[in-house]
């Protein structure tokens, strides 16, 4: 027998309570019970998003909401500034191109955080840019972008919106949609939301709705105006993922029981402990900018193939983590600790990394990283 552990940056672990909630008989989506359920999760989602804006619930992976966040606000020929600091930033660019948007790309070396002044400068140079697309947490590199400062730059522009992919940020660290003025915020179920893949969430500000009213909409399924008009009445335009929404209700109950501040505190302590443990084991963290608390990205030591680490973790130890993508393939490996995780997930991750590196012939003293994590995560610490 091999016990399996899921430490991938999506999908992530799902609490047993949530699995059980999703096993309930399927509700009909036009029944009054569904409207009641939907009304409750709509409200609670606003609490997680820290917003009064409508948060649309879509049956799709996160990319569906990203696509909608391009198609609904811009028209062919419009210009968008895309922060490309990794695989997901690159995806914003590809979606924009698909919808005929002219992309002004702000390239950020993978692993670095964008310099907000570079965004300000790009907007000064081209005031016709209608939207800025960015990640709050770039999962492919483990770097976070400072969306709060970006919002300060974009907010004074009446004709420009800030669109934030917060798929591995929302629920992990503080994202104040309204207080900071984030126009569009995208999240997904299988990351910090502790659910299986299949739901995406997107909040839309009044400024962004004004753009949507004018945009030459090329969306049918991901038509945000149509969804909004249905969802404010606790209905959906098309058949919702009812069982996932039952799970979402349970997730939101758990989140409210913990509280936002405590949840961010837990995520941040775990992330800090693992980063410190990695250093104590003599390893190097990959992000050069601000590290995201959603996951820890480790540079493969010289002579060690990052893909081999990822593979050995899975094959020998039953742990599913992640490797690197594109030019980072083989150079890094990634361990997630977002969502349903506690100190022992982090200690286990460090223990397994030490064991795998030793298996692969890297001179590592077993227990050094683990001891550091244990020390930092003992009861009453931090
Ligand atoms: C996972 C992820 C996505 C969306 O991916 P899907 O596979 O469509 O859910 C987008 N952006 C980031 C930063 C992600 O981590």
Image (tube, rainbow, N blue to C red):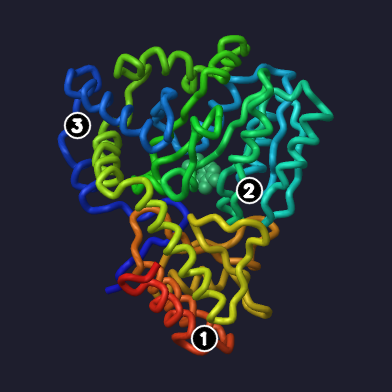
Q: Residue at x 29, y 49 (%)?
A: 258
Residue mark closest to the camera, 3 vs 1:
1
Q: Is residue 64 visible?
A: no
Establish if 51 lies above or below 9: above
Side of 177 relative to 114 (left or right): left
Viewer-nearest residue: 30 or 1: 30
Task: Tell me which numbered mark, 2 or 1, is placed earlier along the sequence.
Answer: 2
Give percent across and percent down for residue 305.
62, 73
Give percent across and percent down for residue 143.
61, 54
Q: Which mark is residue 279?
A: none
Establish if 372 lies above or below 191: below
Q: Mark 1 = which residue? A: 358
Q: Mark 3 = which residue? A: 26
Residue mark closest to the camera, 3 vs 2:
2
Q: Residue at x 40, y 56 (%)?
A: 265
Give percent across and percent down for residue 2.
31, 72
Q: Mark 2 = which residue? A: 87
Side of 52 relative to 215 (left or right): left
The kind of secondary structure element at disc 3 is: loop
The kind of secondary structure element at disc 2 is: helix
Q: Are marks 3 and 1 in contact (CB under 8 Å)?
A: no
Viewer-nearest residue: 75 or 315: 75
């Amino acid at each position: 027998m091999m016990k399996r552990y899921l430490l991938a940056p999506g999908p992530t672990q799902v609490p047993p309570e949530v699995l059980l909630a999703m096993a309930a008989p399927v509700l009909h989506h036009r029944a009054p019970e569904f409207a009641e359920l939907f009304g409750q999760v709509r409200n609670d989602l606003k609490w997680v998003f820290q917003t009064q804006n409508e948060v649309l619930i879509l049956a799709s992976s996160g990319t569906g909401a990203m696509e909608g966040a391009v198609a609904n606000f811009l028209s062919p020929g419009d210009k968008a500034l895309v922060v490309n600091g990794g695989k997901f930033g690159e995806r914003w660019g590809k979606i924009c191109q698909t919808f005929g948007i002219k992309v002004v790309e702000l390239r950020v070396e993978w692993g670095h955080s964008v310099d907000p002044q570079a965004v300000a400068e790009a907007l000064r140079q081209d005031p016709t840019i209608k939207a800025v697309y960015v990640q709050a947490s770039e999962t492919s590199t483990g770097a976070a972008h400072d969306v709060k400062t970006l919002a300060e730059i974009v907010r004074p522009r009446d004709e420009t919106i800030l669109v934030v992919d917060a798929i591995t940020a929302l629920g992990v660290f503080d994202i104040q949609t309204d207080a900071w003025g984030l126009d569009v915020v995208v999240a997904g179920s299988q990351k910090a939301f502790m659910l299986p893949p299949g739901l995406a969430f997107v909040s839309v500000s009044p400024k962004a709705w004004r753009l949507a009213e004018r945009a030459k909409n090329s969306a049918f399924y991901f038509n945000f105006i149509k969804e909004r008009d249905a969802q404010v009445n606790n209905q959906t335009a098309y058949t919702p993922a009812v069982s996932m929404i039952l799970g979402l209700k349970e997730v939101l109950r758990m989140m409210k029981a913990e509280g936002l501040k405590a949840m961010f505190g837990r995520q941040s302590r775990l992330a800090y402990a693992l980063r410190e443990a990695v250093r104590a084991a003599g390893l190097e963290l990959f992000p050069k900018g601000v590290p995201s608390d959603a996951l820890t990205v480790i540079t493969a030591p010289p002579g060690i193939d990052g893909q081999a680490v990822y593979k050995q973790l899975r094959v020998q130890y039953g742990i599913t983590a992640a490797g690197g993508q594109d030019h980072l393939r083989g150079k890094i490996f990634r361990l997630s600790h977002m969502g349903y995780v506690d100190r022992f997930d982090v200690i286990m991750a460090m223990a397994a990394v030490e064991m795998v590196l030793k298996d692969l012939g890297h001179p590592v003293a077993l227990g050094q990283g683990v001891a550091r994590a244990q020390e930092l995560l003992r009861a009453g610490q931090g």
